[in-house]
Image: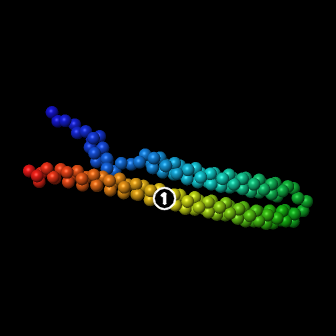
Amino acid sequence: MAKTQDFTTMMKDMMGPFSMDPALIKDALKSRVALGEKLTHVYLDAADKTTELTSKFTKDTLAKVGVLAEVKDQPTDYAKAITDFASALTESSTATLTAYAEIAHKVQSETMELLAAAGNDLSEETKAAVKKSTEVVTAAAKQTTQTVAAAAKPATAQ
């Protein structure tokens, strides 16, 4: 009967020299989650501001429509009301769009600052991980060289 190969042992043997430091993984995960939290706060703040801005614009516009719908004494008053409404709506729209642009600019700036800081942190983490990995691989290579040299001595002595 065929025996099932033990892949767990094979994977341990294969990945043993490339062991990962759980603390490094934990720290990397923490820093990525912290970045996500900071970005979420930036985006939620922007969403809150844009919601308030949209609500204010809508309320102002509806109030102006109410004035537009009022009964006027003269037909020319209706034309004036429409002109005043269009003018006020243009001003309000321009101001609202400018405010949206300011919010978007702030979000973009804050996002870039956070990503730049995260990139610097990642660079430092990577340097530390590479240094540690180099030390581990160098030690493993030294150990292997010594083991091979020790194993070769009895063979030449015979």
Of helix, strand and loop, which one carries label 1? helix
Q: How many marks?
A: 1
Image location (x, y in percent) of residue 88: 79, 64
Q: Which residue is mark 1?
A: 124
Image location (x, y in percent) of residue 126: 44, 57
Residue occupying the point 25% across, 39% down:
6
Between residue 75 and residue 26, name the one nearer to us.
Answer: 26
Q: Is residue 17 left or right of residue 58?
A: left
Q: Quadrant of residue 68?
A: bottom right
* Residue 68 in sight: yes
Image location (x, y in percent) of residue 87: 79, 66
Q: Is residue 150 left or right of residue 26?
A: left
Between residue 134 and residue 14, name the one nearer to us.
Answer: 134
Identify whether 1 is placed above or below 151. Answer: above
Amino acid type, mark 1: Glu
Between residue 25 and residue 139, name the one nearer to us.
Answer: 139
Q: Quadrant of the N terminus?
A: top left
Identify whether 109 is placed above or below 26. Answer: below
Residue occupying the point 64% across, 63% down:
105
Q: Coloring scheme of the render? A: rainbow
Identify whether 22 is placed above or below 130. Answer: above
Between residue 72 and residue 50, name the one nearer to us.
Answer: 50
Which residue is situated farthest in the front direction here?
Answer: 157
* Residue 97 in sight: no
Image location (x, y in percent) of residue 101: 67, 63
Residue occupying the point 43% across, 46% down:
22
Residue occupying the point 41% across, 48% down:
21
Q: Is residue 107 left or right of residue 141?
A: right
Count residues near mark 1 (Cα–Cα under 10 Å), then give few for <14, some for 14-19, many for 20+: few
